[in-house]
Structures are given as structure tokens and as C-alpha cells.
């Protein structure tokens, strides 16, 4: 499951130090998640992830987030930091918006990630666009 979701099958025959940074990151994620698979598949898991998408290309960011959504739908609690507001809006069930480590707002992405509040928190004028996004079946990793 992790091999397919993180696309790491081809890496097992290569020395770790010969993998790119993003490839190494995906292997690290698989190594982190592998011991927890029984709990995650049973819906009894808690994942605390600090910027897990750092160093991943766009496709692998989406693959990782789809995998995490799959685990969340099974009943697991996934808590992660993410500085990409578009990905947070797209994948998060709930967002905590922080400013200098203080909670500013917590709620659904559509309620929390609005132009007025983001402009205030980031101290610069921001607009929020609602793109037309094709629905993707994320019931499977």
C-alpha cells in the first residue's frame, strides 16, 4: 500500500544516498508510516506530521495528501502543519490558522481561509480564488 501510494517500489535496489531529496523524503515517510499500518487500517491511529510535503513535487504532495485523507476517513486523527494554503483548502477537514504561534481561527477551510483574515495574519493584501476543481475519487490511496 505505501509502496504504491508513495511510488517507492523502484528505490529498494538503489543506495539511499543515491536517491534525490524528494525520493529520500518519500522513503522516510514510508518508514514512518509502515509500523503504524495496523493501527491506521483499523482507524485507531494518531499522526502528528510537521511539513510532511516539504521537498516533494506536486504529484507526490497530492499522493501523500490523498493517502492521509484515506487514513482520516478510516477514523484516524491526522494533525499536520502545512504552509501551502491552497493544499490546506483542498484537503483539510479543519484548519487552524496561527499568527506568531497564537490561534487566530479554527474551522472549515472555507470559513478560515478568507481574504480578510489571511491579509490580516500575513500583513499583506491577499485575494482568495475559488478554482473550478474536478472531483477526484480519493477513497483509495
Image: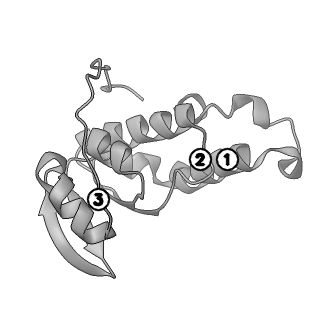
- Local packing at callout 1 (Cα closer than 10 Å; few below 14, some 14-19, many 20+) is many
Callout 2: 10 Å neighbours few (<14), some, many (20+)?
A: some
**Above or below for 18 versus 2:** below
- Marks 3 & 2, CB-CB < 8 Å contact: no
Is 109 placed left or right of 48 in the picture? left
Q: Are marks 1 and 2 in contact (CB under 8 Å)?
A: yes
Where is residue 89 shown, x and y percent of the image? 27, 44
Classify residue 57 by image quadrant. Answer: top right
Front-most of 102 and 52? 102
Q: Residue at x 79, y 45 (%)?
A: 20
Residue bearing the label numbered 1: 27
Report the residue at 32% width, 26% height from top.
138
Q: Position of residue 95 (x, y in %)?
A: 23, 57
Between marks 1 and 2, how big is the CA–CA gap? Answer: 5 Å
Label of residue 125 in the image = 3
Residue corresponding to mark 2: 30
Horizontal arrangement in the rendering, residue 136 relative to residue 105 (left or right): right
Amino acid at each position: 500500500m505505501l509502496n504504491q501510494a508513495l511510488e517507492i517500489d523502484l528505490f529498494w535496489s538503489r543506495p539511499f544516498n543515491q536517491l534525490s531529496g524528494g525520493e529520500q523524503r518519500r522513503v522516510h515517510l514510508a518508514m514512518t508510516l509502515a509500523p503504524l499500518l495496523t493501527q491506521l487500517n483499523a482507524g485507531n491511529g494518531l499522526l502528528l506530521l510537521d511539513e510532511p510535503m516539504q521537498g516533494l513535487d506536486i504529484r507526490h504532495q497530492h499522493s501523500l495528501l490523498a493517502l492521509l485523507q484515506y487514513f482520516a476517513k478510516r477514523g484516524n486523527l491526522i494533525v499536520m502543519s502545512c504552509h501551502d494554503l491552497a493544499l490546506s483548502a483542498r484537503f483539510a477537514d479543519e484548519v487552524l490558522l496561527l499568527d506568531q504561534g497564537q490561534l487566530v481561527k479554527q474551522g472549515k477551510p472555507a470559513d478560515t481561509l478568507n481574504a480578510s483574515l489571511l491579509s490580516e495574519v500575513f500583513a499583506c493584501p491577499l485575494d482568495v480564488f475559488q478554482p473550478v476543481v474536478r472531483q477526484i475519487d480519493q477513497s483509495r490511496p
